[in-house]
Amino acid sequence: MDFGFNEEQEMLRNSARSFFERECPTTFVRKMLDDPLGYSPAMWRKIAEMGWTGLLYPEKYGGLGLGMVDLVVVLEEMGRALLPSPFLSTIIEAGSAILLGATEAQRKRLLPQLISGEKTAAFALAEPNGSLSADGIAARAVADRRSGGFVIDGVKALVQGAPGADLLVVAARTRAKGPAEKAVSLFLVDAGTPGVTVTPLPSVDGTRRVGEVRLRSVKVGKDALLGRADAAWPVVMKVLDRANVALCAEQAGLAQICLELTVEYAKTRVQFGKPIGVFQAIKHPCAEMLLELESSKSAVYYAAWALDHDPKAAPLAVAMAKSYAGEAGYRIAARSIQLHGGIGFTWEHDLHLYFKRAKTTELTYGGGTHHREQVARAIGL
Amino acid sequence: MDFGFNEEQEMLRNSARSFFERECPTTFVRKMLDDPLGYSPAMWRKIAEMGWTGLLYPEKYGGLGLGMVDLVVVLEEMGRALLPSPFLSTIIEAGSAILLGATEAQRKRLLPQLISGEKTAAFALAEPNGSLSADGIAARAVADRRSGGFVIDGVKALVQGAPGADLLVVAARTRAKGPAEKAVSLFLVDAGTPGVTVTPLPSVDGTRRVGEVRLRSVKVGKDALLGRADAAWPVVMKVLDRANVALCAEQAGLAQICLELTVEYAKTRVQFGKPIGVFQAIKHPCAEMLLELESSKSAVYYAAWALDHDPKAAPLAVAMAKSYAGEAGYRIAARSIQLHGGIGFTWEHDLHLYFKRAKTTELTYGGGTHHREQVARAIGL
Amino acid sequence: MDFNLSAQEETFRDQLRAWLAKNLPKDARRLARAGEHAQEDRVQFLKDWAKKVYDGGWAGVSWPKEYGGVGATLMEQVIFNEEMARAGAPEHLNVIGLGMTGPTIIAHGTEGQKKRYLAKILSAEEIWCQGFSEPNAGSDLAGLQCRAERDGDDFIVNGQKVWTSLAHIAQWCILLVRTDSSAAKHAGITYLLVDMASPGITVRPLVQITGDAEFNEIYFENVRVPVANVLGGINQGWHVAITTLMHERGTLAIAVQVRFRMLLDQLLAKAKKVERNGRPVTEDPIVRQKLAQMHIEVELLKPNGYRSLTKLLKGEPGPEGSIGKLFWSELNQRLEELAVEILGPSALLQAGSKYAEDDGFWLYQFLRSRGNTIEAGTSEIQKNIISERVLGLPRG
Amino acid sequence: MDFNLSAQEETFRDQLRAWLAKNLPKDARRLARAGEHAQEDRVQFLKDWAKKVYDGGWAGVSWPKEYGGVGATLMEQVIFNEEMARAGAPEHLNVIGLGMTGPTIIAHGTEGQKKRYLAKILSAEEIWCQGFSEPNAGSDLAGLQCRAERDGDDFIVNGQKVWTSLAHIAQWCILLVRTDSSAAKHAGITYLLVDMASPGITVRPLVQITGDAEFNEIYFENVRVPVANVLGGINQGWHVAITTLMHERGTLAIAVQVRFRMLLDQLLAKAKKVERNGRPVTEDPIVRQKLAQMHIEVELLKPNGYRSLTKLLKGEPGPEGSIGKLFWSELNQRLEELAVEILGPSALLQAGSKYAEDDGFWLYQFLRSRGNTIEAGTSEIQKNIISERVLGLPRG
């Protein structure tokens, strides 16, 4: 047994930390808030050059062939830096869908494009009803006898990274009858295909953009079907597991910097003739925040390890991590504002950026209640 | 509008406070823990002489004709004193059942006996299934054609004040079909009737005794039927409302003394060269306890007032009070132990007595979750 | 104990309701909302409305008649606040004048000051702002450094204040300054009434987490304030300021309950329309528990407030107001968090975005509520006050 | 990062399991439970069991071989603790000797002391108790007043200690005394190894909320302790005591997770049999949420403990142990409260009462758990330690 990161992983953390400190200070993040795309394509290319986009992917697709545990290290730093980027949508979601569900030919064609930063992608799953179950997929794809391809109709809402994405991986029902879990397929749809409309949905967290994707009689070819027909739901579940672990890892990194900023402020801010850090009203919440932060990390590391090494245990581990770290990260960000007092409530101070991203992360792909119910099921209740 | 107690009520509080300080110090309460009956009949007579047993009852039955708001004042003091007595079972429960459900002849016969302290009584409602709804009543009473009376069979568990009670008010199904709410009757059963067995159930709270009541082919006369047949459930609900308000009022009094003891201890206990009350780790919980205590009182006073003056609003007000004050009182008692440190965890210190009664009160006649669901229904959810 | 209105109180309420039915503009809620339209139009609307209330004879319910008030009971003042909130009437623009300056002048002002300032507060002719907090004197308010030096019949003020709402539209400011730096911290403070048109005052808006600029920083550079504008005596300012703070936490907090009641009703109505997994979210036992708990706490604000009011009726508001402030500010955060939880991720979409819930209303409330436990004394400070001044625990 | 056992660790575990299958008495759990039968029989059983473990070569897994230990890794020590708990093996009777005295002697003892005491701790030939807390030195441990005066080659000890578990059966006591009252609070303390058979020692049991007497008070009246029994140097006791406390909060806490896992499994199994309103209570979404949350937190204890263990593997246990202590003690209170909530009022019936749940087991756990956040350093003290010694916030 070994519960620490190895030397390579520590080096990875150091290089990510210094890269983002240099390339992505909060002044840069704030600039991106007003950017129509929401991130810098130039920086995205640099990130790809660092190799992080390919960490998770086999070498034959241009990746490094490492695992989620390694990636968690980088993701924590991305959360800490509030990085605006298509990493979640392109690399974690769309990329994983392709890796886990596509044919070898599709993988060979598409993964190198995503890993190299040449193309960005989004995973168009959830719909306006907000459901995360297969029943919730109302979009449908009908086989087009003439072309041998498909015609897709539907609306996807709150799609991560949709604005500006080149490629959309779209979930749609391909069988009208039978259990929904055996009736969903994934399709590769170029964002420029006629009938596809992407509308940005401005959200409180400006560091990660979401959008609506409308598909109106969108005609795609036979090769747009990702992997086998009707068999995509298990792939979707695995993609969501990865996305949730990625979100939690970012959340842990974000929570860590919130706590660090708070401790630092408490050491220097003087009231009543003393640094406020001497007061138990400040001290004790900080101790509780550390407890929750450390527990969040434990949950995330175990979930990432399970994704790599114990697939059967993974869904439960992910549900545990998301419910715990999702909520804890939000609480830590909220308490950081409280402990900063008035200054923490200003636009000028960075805390509100962490706070807004933390709440968004908590609710993305299921909040605490949803995931605790998954835990209850998994433990046989 | 007026949100304070009037002068008479303040006098009532003062006289109750000094009576219990004199007659019921915790040394006396501890003695009663080892007493087989659990309370002192001599003191019970004194309480009756003070008039408190009759506060709630019309003068024609030997009472004072006052209301729940007046009684709350005395109940808070009883909780503060951890009074071991049959007040809840005899006066609040059985007495109210008779007042609200019996025929005038029954009232005239029985209420003076209870109010004077001559007889004690218990309200045998709940059964081993723990249900608080009419469906949960499995005990049944069958009309006995020969005698014109009834034969009762059933088991009642956790009956307040059953050990030692002279009279039992027993809820039983009198119709096999139809909605349970229209099939329950109450019966007046002498505890000495053949077939009745009362077994004490020693509980963590030794200051209020509960017992099991078994009825095996218990034959009672026609006049044992309390009021009208099949019509008792609405009476039961009202009795429970009164019982819950009484429990909450006691809980508020109990919580108040816990907070007072804690504040007093914090002023005198010295650690690190200072009274521990200077530390925010002590101060801030005390402030939160006060907030919860004051809110508990608000909830209890309003519920008591509603029982007296606004019967339609009463069930919601009672559910609010029980869920809030029940839980808050327990939390306050638990935090008092924590803030006392080691000494608060000893048998020698009185805090554990409050703690045990507070938890018992919280769970008696429905805990917080049960009553919040009643609130949800009452507000149209 | 009587939770019903007395006959006199009922008459008062009915007359007010009748007046409101006739005089409250139909689109008041929209016109009063921040961000909806030009700031100046909104301010003008609120000024006009305040004037209308004054002319109608409803301003300053519990203030003495001789200074323009109604001269009614404090209980009627509370009924007034409740009814105004319930009717959806806009908050009085002069919230600081009404809730803080006025009561403090009534308690500590000279006859001349009462005559000069009180009526114009009620008519909203003169809007007030509050210059108490400083960048380095937040929770430690008495540590303030903004200083005033005597120069003949004037004080000359230099320094900075922060978190002053309404400063950009106010004519007057209640200002705490240090007039004796050699004295103990609490002993060298003076309470000034400052004309915001005085040369040397600069107001800079302060944008907060919501993106709005509700608050301001004020800079004072050699600002002359006549000694006659001292309220309650030179170097007596701390004692006077306590009156202001108690009123802020006590009287003002009472109207708050109605607003939360209305907000919760809005959430309950909204929740009934939300579906999750094809069923109304209000059928979910977990959501039911949480909404029921909210209902309980929102309802308890009322008897809680009333019960401390009973003490208020006997004189000055005391430190008990801190209990109410602590309760409602923490409660509002939980309420807004629950709204976001029930509505789901779409509650995080901004006003103007497709799928945004009630056009970002809940998002705004959620963000704004984070300030509640900081402004007007943080929760930590309230707990200090409650434990020291109500419970009598020793100071650190 | 690898949450699986290595090959060596697996071998160690399998060998231990095989040994336990052969050697653990079938009725160990019953025999070890307090209150079930005569105190002496229980102690004898636990002594015999400890001796059996020692003779089997399993005692002191991570202790050096030359002092009677196994000389294995700390990780194997953890596996040992886990497996013993999982098998339902009784806790080692010499819990203080093993968890506190031993590691402290290994860190600070002379060679002679190591040879004299360590093996007999492992074999449970000599049981230890801990004399740290005093009536007026609880959270403020360094404020202790029990004093020792030098008299030739002895110290003469006078004073009182409290909360000493096992004092009534212990042969030895680790005792903190004040040897220099003129020195600063932390500087005048000495750490003594005291023979409990010394004349002048009186032990008085201390009954707690559960009705059991787990703890004792000890009175010292002119008790002679040889200077040779000083551990770590005269007036160096505070530094030595820190080692003991860190071990108490660090190493000991790791075994705790398995016990909570087993307790939660017991609750889950029990809950499945409970009906409310005619339906299994585990179908209630509210109960499901709460049980799931418990599962999560109990599971997190493990990687949390392991991750601080990673630091432990690199040397002495640090203040991080306070995080684990804070977590499990608060968690256990919530767990027991949940058990009582799920089981309902019958959970409050005493052992022996009809309808009592599992014969009062949950009631006992519920009451006992209140002590968890007080003993071995209150939660408040743990938060001080975490904020000051882990996060580096300034002392008050």
Image (tube, coloured by chain):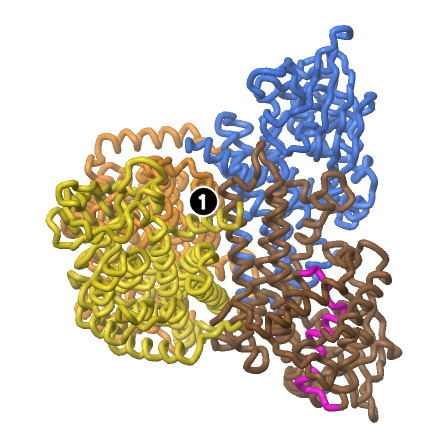
Chain colours: A yellow, B blue, C orange, D brown
Q: Relative to D217, is C24 above or below?
A: above
| Residue behind mark 1 | C305
B4 displayed left or right of A224: right
**Quarter of image, res A58:** bottom left
Residue nearer the viewer, A381 or D150: A381
- The residue at the point 19 percent across, 70 percent down is C200
Q: Farthest residue toward the top? A: B146
Residue A293's spot in the image, x, y percent? Answer: 45, 66
Residue A225's spot in the image, x, y percent? Answer: 23, 50
Pointer 1 indicates a residue of which chain?
C
Residue C230's spot in the image, x, y percent? Answer: 31, 64
Residue nearer the viewer, C190 or A100: A100
Find the magenta span and give its range.
Answer: D87-111
Residue C23's spot in the image, x, y percent? Answer: 21, 34
C175 displayed left or right of D186: left
Report helix, strand or loop for mark 1.
Answer: helix
Q: Relative to B170, is C393 above or below?
A: below
Tell me which amino acid carries mark 1.
Gly
D88 displayed left or right of D337: right
Q: How many marks?
A: 1
Magenta stretch contains residue D98: yes
Q: Relative to A113, is A153 above or below?
A: above
**Quarter of image, res B34:** top right
C195 displayed left or right of D282: left
- The residue at the point 21 percent across, 57 percent down is C171
Residue C38 visible in the snapshot = yes
Residue nearer the viewer, C338 or B117: C338
Magenta region, main secondary structure = helix
Q: Farthest residue toward the left? A: A194
Residue nearer the viewer, A200 or D123: D123
Residue C63 visible in the snapshot = no
